[in-house]
Amino acid sequence: MPAQGPAKQPTTELDTRYSSALNPRPGAADVTATDWAEARRQLDAAEIFWVSTVRSDGRLHVTPVIAAWHDGALYFSTGPGEQKAKNLAHDGHCALTTGGNSLTEGLDLVVEGAAEQVTDPALLEEVITAYETKYGAHITSPEGTFHGIGDAFRKGGAVVFAVAPATAYGFGRDEGVYTHTRWAF
């Protein structure tokens, strides 16, 4: 289970091989690494993530999920019989990815870590609150897309996983300035 309490602060490094620092524009500001606080804001705001897991035969499995950041980890869920649950039972290593599809603006994020199943009822309630706060009527309204997910968490109809970052990457684009930031935890 991810440690509760203050989240670990990562070391931050700009990878100049993949940043505009190699080929700066005349008059452009210095290229700097993206601050982890900005990455966290983006993780909080992102609605869709892609989770990548590995099947027992080594083949990849990638699928979209909703996820919420809480207390130093990203939380997502799946049905107990779904492929990603089977994959994570075999190998907990995974990546959650979010971002946009623009070549000129945005910040794409990749969070790598080991998924750990959450079974503690008190923590599950915290995760439910994080989901309800983030996704609002999609979860709380009877007409919501994911209505009932809280009860599914409580009753085991959905398996909840926590991924505390081991490493994260940010790929920023802002008016032709590109950054590649690595955060190590």
Image (spheres, rainbow, N blue to C red):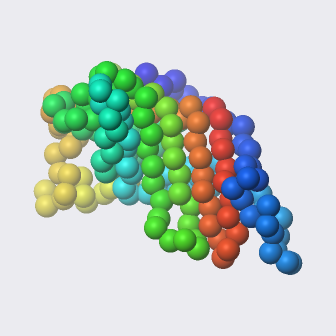
In this picture, residue 181 sits left or right of residue 40: right
Q: Residue at x 48, y 59 (%)?
A: 99
The location of residue 167, given as percent across then percent down, is: 59, 36
Q: Quadrant of the N terminus?
A: top left
The location of residue 126, given as percent across then percent down, is: 37, 35
Q: Nearest the camera: 35 or 178?
A: 178
Work out whether 94 lies above or below 49.
above
Q: Residue at x 56, y 31 (%)?
A: 166
Q: Residue at x 37, y 43 (%)?
A: 51
- Quadrant of the rendered image containing residue 129: top left
Mark yes or no: residue 52 visible.
yes
Q: Quadrant of the C terminus?
A: top right
Q: Residue at x 66, y 76 (%)?
A: 175
Q: Nearest the camera: 55 or 134?
A: 55
The location of residue 38, given as percent across then percent down, is: 62, 55
In this picture, residue 32 sits left or right of residue 119: right
Q: Nearest the camera: 120 or 56?
A: 56
